[in-house]
């Protein structure tokens, strides 16, 4: 896979349309790395000019901010903004809704004003512009349910693009009983991903997995690497991992193009 | 004459009491830190019209939305009748507007009676729903005791007030028909007409007493209600308006960036600033986050008084749904309880005297705070623009930045972030390794 960093491009006197913000999960988590690769593969198929920050990228600071460590968050934010402001690009695209939310809504105040979109938004434009063409969707008629990531849906009001993508696969989109504005969290946000949950009657990801299983879908589509992990764990816990699979919308699309 | 004087005294007393409560409310809310919400008044007005006047979010549950809307509209309109009641009370007249308005008067009263019966029906349905149907947000622990009683008291008061209004009209009609004393012939009223047979066999003098008692109880009930508001979740009928107006109108899910932190971070990253220079010492007293109501902003405190304790937030909360003790509704209720306690402390001691208590720990526990996934469901579901999440975050900020009391795993995550630029122990230099494996 040949991927250029924005610095390499700049050294050649070029600038990309799109800066792909890979994110910590997308860079390091084994499952999320596959999503990163699928998305890159789609960008290449569509001939999009893009680059990554590579070793210059660092955590946006979202988990620190939501844990209450404003100090650590702003240290991250200010140094990221310093790096981002050295480069020229049109848009930032990210596969992680947490990165999306932070870059889009929390960086502007600190001097980082960028046009930031989620990968499902970019992909749905590429589909409309027919830059990506579905050939022979293996998901034809399959039941797929979409889990709204909190930081994509409620926090940024992106509900339709991922759904449009699933529909473009000719799949049978099944909604869970709580979806869109009322979508139930997967349980990972607000730094919960990194700790045990408080005592209760059930884990949040199990509850969400149950709602997904109620739709009788074969595939649970997600748009966030953390939701992906939580739901995959949920499916395993329910011993349904041989029948039901969790994929990022980008992975589904990559398989069908 | 005596009754006019008595009425005027009670009226003035109630209004003064109400003003006193309002001033207390205003003072308590202003114990919070300043936050600028004076921008974009156009957008703010629109939001207020949509959420407070139009109650748009109440229609997420259409049936409840309609019932609530009927009670609200009826409540506002029937109070027009108050104008006449007050005039009669002060002047010692009886139905002073009837001769002035003529037929229109009868139309108005008929209309009010229809509203009154609609309110009675809605309120009975609300009571059934709240007490007989096992709806989780109405039977959960955070509503036990006073909050549950408060909700029911209001329903009882509403039914009683409406009944008194109808009863007063019914007896009035009997007296009118009989040409008793000063009761002129103003016509019949569509709903209270059905109560008339109840009184037909009674002495006119007894009916007269019943009419007067109904009239008095009705107005006393309204004045009681006015002053009960301050102690009740029903404060929302007034505060929903300013609360929606001043609510967060940024569309995204961004949290505020603390200015105080920004200054320090800039100073740290800027090599020109000497971190030990004396200019910085005053910043040592800066407190990050909140452990008591004084550290919250006035909008958050206004939120706490506005909360109707409906529990829509908690029933959407993933932590609450899975049995954790976190309930965003109870975050709001506890904030109000603490604020009230602080207010009483100030009443007693002129200025706040340390009582050894704090919002954090004495009211809201760490276990609640750490259970939040910051999913925004509470904020999204609140029909009147309340933001429980912002309070949770401010308290977390205090725990992390002032107390360093985060759970161990959170500290690990933050250490990784600080050292490697990722929440896991991976090296920043390996950020591109995903390309190859
Ligand atoms: S943001 Fe926190 S308190 Fe609000 S609904 Fe989500 S988990 Fe519950
Ligand atoms: S915060 Fe809003 S949704 Fe929650 S109980 Fe109060 S009024 Fe209801």
Image (cartoon, coloured by chain):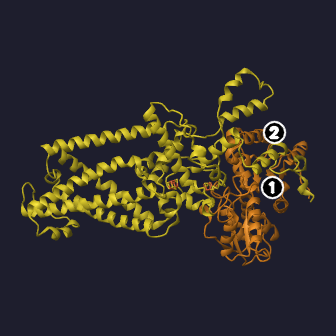
Identify the element where label 1 is drawn. Answer: helix
Question: Which residue is located at x 80 percent, y 46 percent?
Answer: B417
- The circle on residue A107 is none
* Residue A96, position as x, y percentages in the image: 75, 55
* Quadrant of the rendered image containing residue B270: top right
Ligand 1 placement by image quarter: bottom right
**Ligand 1 under 8 Å from disc 2 Cβ:** no
Q: Pointer 2 indicates a residue of which chain?
A: A
Residue density around tag 2, few if under 14, some if 14–19, many if 20 or more, within 10 Å = few
Check contact, mark 2 vs mark 1: CB within 8 A.
no
Location of the N terminus of chain B by quadrant is: top left
The front one of B359 and A3 is B359
Chain depicted in orange: A
Q: Which chain does the yellow colour mark? A: B
* Residue furthest out toward the right: B436
Q: Do discs 2 and 1 belong to a common subunit? A: yes
Q: Quadrant of residue A229?
A: bottom right
Kindly tell me whether residue B77 is visible in this rendering: yes
Classify the position of the C terminus of chain B by image quarter: bottom right
Residue B51 x/y as whole percent: 47, 54
Q: Residue furthest top?
A: B278
Question: Residue B21, relative to residue A36: is it above or below?
Answer: above
Q: Residues within 10 Å of mark 1 (few under 14, many from 20)?
A: many
> Which chain hosts label 1?
A
Q: Which mark is residue A25?
A: 1
Q: Position of residue B15 (x, y in %)?
A: 30, 41
Q: Which residue is mark 2?
A: A86
Q: Secondary structure at mark 2?
A: loop
């Amino acid at each position: 896979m040949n991927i250029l960093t924005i610095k390499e491009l700049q050294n050649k006197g070029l600038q990309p349309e799109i800066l792909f913000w890979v994110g910590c999960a997308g860079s390091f988590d084994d499952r999320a790395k596959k999503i990163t690769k699928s998305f890159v593969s789609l960008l290449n198929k569509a001939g999009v000019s893009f680059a990554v920050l590579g070793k210059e990228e660092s955590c946006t600071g979202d988990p620190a901010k939501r844990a209450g460590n404003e100090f650590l968050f702003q240290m991250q934010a200010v140094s990221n903004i310093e790096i981002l402001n050295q480069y020229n690009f049109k848009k930032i695209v990210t596969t992680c809704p947490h990165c999306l939310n932070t870059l889009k809504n929390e960086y502007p105040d600190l001097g980082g004003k960028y046009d930031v979109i989620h990968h499902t938004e970019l992909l749905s434009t590429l589909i409309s512009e027919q830059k990506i063409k579905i050939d022979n969707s293996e998901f034809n008629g399959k039941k797929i349910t979409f889990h709204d990531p909190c930081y994509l849906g409620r926090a940024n009001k992106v509900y339709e693009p991922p759904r449009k993508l699933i529909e473009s696969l000719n799949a049978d989109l099944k909604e869970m009983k709580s979806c869109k504005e009322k979508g139930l969290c997967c349980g990972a946000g607000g730094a919960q991903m990194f700790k045990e949950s408080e005592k209760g009657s059930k884990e949040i990801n199990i509850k969400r997995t149950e709602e997904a299983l109620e739709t009788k879908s074969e595939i649970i589509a997600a748009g966030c690497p953390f939701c992906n992990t939580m739901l995959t764990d949920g499916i395993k816990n329910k011993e349904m991992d041989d029948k039901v699979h969790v994929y990022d919308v980008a992975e589904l699309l990559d398989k069908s193009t | 004459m005596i009754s006019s004087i008595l009425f005027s005294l009670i009226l003035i007393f109630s209004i003064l009491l109400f003003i006193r409560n309002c001033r207390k409310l205003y003072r308590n809310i202003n114990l919070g830190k300043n936050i600028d919400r004076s921008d974009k008044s156009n957008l703010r007005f629109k939001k207020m019209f949509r959420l407070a006047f139009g109650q748009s979010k109440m229609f997420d549950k259409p049936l409840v939305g309609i019932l609530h809307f009927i009670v609200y509209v009826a409540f506002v309109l029937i109070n027009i009748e108050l104008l006449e009641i007050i005039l009669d009370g002060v002047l010692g007249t009886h139905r002073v507007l009837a001769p002035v308005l003529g037929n229109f008067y009868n139309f108005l009263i008929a209309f009010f009676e229809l509203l009154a019966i609609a309110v009675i029906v809605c309120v009975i349905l609300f009571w059934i729903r709240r007490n007989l149907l096992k709806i989780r947000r109405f039977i959960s622990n955070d509503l036990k005791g006073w909050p549950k009683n408060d909700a029911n008291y209001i329903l009882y008061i509403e039914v009683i007030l409406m009944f008194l209004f109808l009863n007063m009209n019914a007896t009035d009609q009997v007296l009118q028909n009989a040409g008793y004393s000063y009761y002129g012939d103003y016509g019949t009223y569509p709903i209270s007409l059905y109560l008339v047979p109840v009184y037909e066999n009674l002495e006119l003098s007894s009916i007269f007493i019943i009419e007067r008692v109904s009239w008095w109880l009705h107005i006393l009930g309204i004045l009681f209600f006015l002053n009960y508001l301050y102690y009740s979740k029903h404060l929302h009928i007034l505060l929903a308006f300013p609360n929606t107006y001043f609510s967060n109108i940024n569309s995204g899910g961004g949290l505020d960036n603390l200015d105080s932190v920004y200054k320090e971070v800039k100073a740290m990253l800027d090599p020109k600033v000497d971190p030990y220079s004396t200019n910085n010492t005053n910043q040592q007293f800066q407190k990050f986050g909140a452990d008591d109501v004084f550290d919250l902003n006035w909008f958050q405190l206004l939120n706490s008084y506005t909360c109707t304790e409906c529990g829509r937030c908690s029933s959407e909360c993933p932590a609450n749904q899975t049995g954790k003790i976190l309930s965003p509704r109870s975050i709001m209720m506890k904030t109000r309880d603490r604020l009230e306690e602080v207010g009483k402390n100030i009443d007693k001691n002129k200025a706040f005297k340390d009582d050894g208590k704090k919002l954090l720990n004495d009211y809201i526990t760490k276990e609640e705070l750490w259970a939040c996934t910051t999913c925004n469901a509470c904020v999204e579901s609140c029909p009147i623009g309340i933001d429980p999440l912002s309070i949770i975050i401010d308290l977390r900020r205090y725990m992390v930045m002032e107390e360093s009391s985060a759970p161990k795993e959170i500290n690990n995550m933050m250490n990784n972030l600080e050292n490697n630029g990722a929440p896991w122990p991976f090296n920043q230099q390996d950020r591109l390794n995903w390309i190859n494996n």
